[in-house]
Amino acid sequence: MKIGIVGLGFVGLSLTSVLASKGYRTVGIDIDKRKCEKISNGNSPFFEPDLEKTLRSGLKKELTIGNDFSLLNDCDFIFVTVGTPQSENGTIDLSMIKKSITTIGKDLHKNNKNPIILIKSTVVPGTIKNTILPILEKKSNKKEGKDFGLISNPEFLQESSAIKDTKFPHAVVLGGQETKYMRKANNFFSKLHPKTPIIITNHQTAEMIKYANNSFLATKISFINQLSNICQNIPGANIDDIAKTIGLDPRIGKLFLNAGPGYGGSCLPKDMKALINFANNVGINPTLLNAVEEINIKQIDQIISLIKQKLGDISSKRITILGTAFKSDTDDIRDSVAIKLIKKLLKRKAKIIIHDPKAIQNTMNIFGKRISYAKSINDALSKSQCVVIMTQWKQYENLNNNQIKQMTKKFIIDCRRMLVKKELDGDYFAIGLGKQN
Ligand code: UGA
């Protein structure tokens, strides 16, 4: 059995590495030659815990990395994991997936295996049936269900736990017709993940499951963020005690109830926009989804108001941002709320100094010399007038009075409530806490 993966981002490279490390003959394809070279040498193009270790273990077995689609010609399974980013107007940009599918389609006649093509990329309902399938059949002159299989197989992994999630997913969704190809895919996944529920459904439902998943997670976050804003106006109230307690109710569940500066990253904001757009297009006014998005966007404004309240005019004030990655254990800053905050503060002419254990280089690629970069938390706080903890990196828990002493004005905004239990010599504000007595 040989497995091909097209698109070596978080999803594709994690899948490639896990399958290869388990001993499957695997081929990973990406159009970016330099990225392929890096990966072939055992180096990941981005930081993800355990990824390099898994990749290197795969490279010792039967793993080939390259940019030549003909490597897919004798594959039994071809996973498509290319990005489907957001276009300027908020709709989903299908250009990359259309390009990959066109090439795979053109090459299908060379494949003597009648492969199964599995679409992992997130696409709005109807895309696989109405766009991807016609391209594949037209370019290959072959018939789906007879000459090849086409299955929607949405992905649920989270960055920062991508390897664990790839090895142990909570569910496998297979969308498409119930043909011999579906049976073969079902067999493959039952062996790969013996304990995981497999849901077999049609393409449209599989596509919608992905949006349902991500929009529900975003809803949980905006819900807790709205409650946390209410708590801030109740003296002594604590959002974490509330989240912990409601999380014990199995109907609610404890995860994704961490109040903070709003959700970011390359998935939740983009998928919310795509779903809102899609709903409007099918004649549904998505009032709840719109509110979830609005709460998320406004969350950052309260940080700016607070800074203004404490520092007055922000221009030329020295403000430290701890954490620019969209969450901890990643160097990814795509759609990071911290990056948005920095942009807003720069517009108001603040002097920004940032610290992040992994994402400095990516942050530099955006801001260059317009902001300063500190190697240590100490350097980041020196002569600062305000510090904002944006990302929940473990090391920020150790922030102490010795470090705060170096600030010229000791105003601390803790968006993740990491320092709640400390007696800090400063003016401390935490998202989700009412004024303490
Ligand atoms: C998200 C989903 O969680 C994955 O299931 C999905 O597969 C992925 O998108 C995708 O569609 O590819 P990811 O973008 O890696 O995963 O990030 P999350 O862990 O979901 O975090 C998203 C944002 O929500 C972060 O900014 C995080 O700080 C924030 N968040 C998360 C909170 O503010 N509070 C929480 O309780 C949880």
Image (spheres, helix red, strand yellow):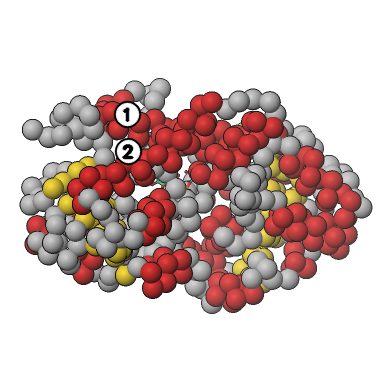
Give the structural element (helix, strand or loop) at label 2. loop
Quick check: which quadrant has ligand 1?
top left
Q: Position of residue 375 (x, y in %)?
A: 27, 71
Along the line of sight, the residue nearer the viewer: 340 or 398: 340
384 horizontally vs 365: left or right: left
Kindly identify which residue carries mark 2: 259
Kindly identify the residue that appears in the image at 69 percent across and 71 percent down.
Answer: 67
Quarter occupied by residue 405? bottom left
Number of numbered tags placed on the structure image: 2
Question: If you read the primary sequence from the N terminus, does the residue marked by circle 2 or circle 1 appear first?
Answer: 1
Task: Verify CB contact (< 8 Å) between mark 2 and mark 1.
Answer: yes
Kindly identify the residue that appears in the image at 50 percent across and 43 percent down.
Answer: 268
Q: Quadrant of the C terminus?
A: top left
Quarter occupied by residue 298? top left
User: Identity of the amino acid at label 1?
Assistant: Leu
User: Identity of the amino acid at label 2?
Assistant: Ala
368 horizontally vs 357: left or right: right
Q: Is residue 322 visible?
A: no
Q: CA distance from mark 2 to mark 1?
A: 9 Å
Along the line of sight, the residue nearer the viewer: 173 or 168: 173
Along the line of sight, the residue nearer the viewer: 54 or 383: 383
Q: Position of residue 39 (x, y in %)?
A: 55, 72
Kindly identify which residue carries mark 1: 227
Q: Quadrant of the N terminus?
A: bottom right
342 horizontally vs 236: left or right: right
